[in-house]
Amino acid sequence: AQSVTQLGSHVSVSEGALVLLRCNYSSSVPPYLFWYVQYPNQGLQLLLKYTTGATLVKGINGFEAEFKKSETSFHLTKPSAHMSDAAEYFCAVSTMEYGNKLVFGAGTILRVKS
Amino acid sequence: NAGVTQTPKFQVLKTGQSMTLQCAQDMNHNSMYWYRQDPGMGLRLIYYSASEGTTDKGEVPNGYNVSRLNKREFSLRLESAAPSQTSVYFCASSETKRGYTFGSGTRLTVV
């Protein structure tokens, strides 16, 4: 079985501060890992993904994430938050063992304070 | 524009009514999915279709049926709507490692 835990349902940062959204996964086989962003009343947009290769993955809008197998983590970071980053962020995992179906975490709502 | 198209965008149903949510993709993906999104629960898989002609249950299939009409289209049917099915429904398509492409969602309210 595979699962995803996102630590913190709400995260609040000041504009210009570091953004850190935490994601831990559970999988018995090598995972594919994804971060999606959802702006209010919109669908999900892919931020970045890890499949194989380099463990530090860069995505859109200045976000990046690092796959750490020993910690079963895939935390999302951005050096400097912008007001436009306010949204809900979802971490997700898929594996070939599970037929490549995406399993999502519960989501983290990011608030950016001016 | 290439992507996943869902219709309708909004719908209000009375308890016991039926309806079909439509989804079409133009990326020639083999796999298609239906998820529901509820506050604090992320997205949960209702049904999926790994390829044309096949469908299978996901995590929360009760009260739903699906049809993979052809490679492009994957519909979700509520035979007798219940208030517990009030949710936002997302259709998605994918090709293995490339991740999923999501539609813009259908907001369904059952009263």
Image (spheres, helix red, strand yellow):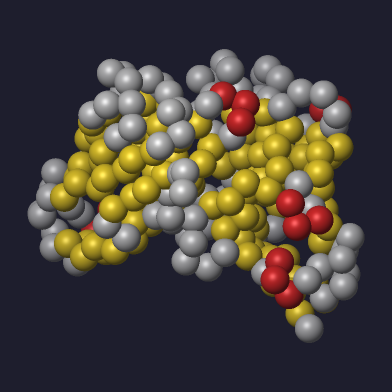
Q: Nearer the viewer, residue B37 or A1?
A: B37
Q: Please state if A34 lies on the left or on the right of B71 as rendered.
A: right
Report the residue at 62% width, 46% height from top: A46
Picture coordinates of residue A40 (x, y %)?
53, 68
Picture coordinates of residue A47 (x, y %)?
68, 48
- Residue B49 visible (yes or no): yes
Query: Image quadrant of residue A114?
Result: bottom right
Picture coordinates of residue A54 (x, y %)?
86, 29
Figure check: B71 above or below B6: above
Q: Please state if B60 lies on the left or on the right of A25 as rendered.
A: left
Picture coordinates of residue B93 (x, y %)?
45, 35
- Residue B35 visible (yes or no): no
Report the residue at 87% width, 72% height from top: A16
Figure check: B8 above or below B57: below
Report the residue at 70% width, 71% height from top: A84
Report the residue at 24% width, 62% height from top: B11
Residue at the outermost bottom position: A114
Total labels drawn? 0
Q: Please state if B107 lies on the left or on the right of A16 as rendered.
A: left
Residue at the outermost front position: B1
Query: Quadrant of the image for the C terminus of chain B?
Result: bottom left
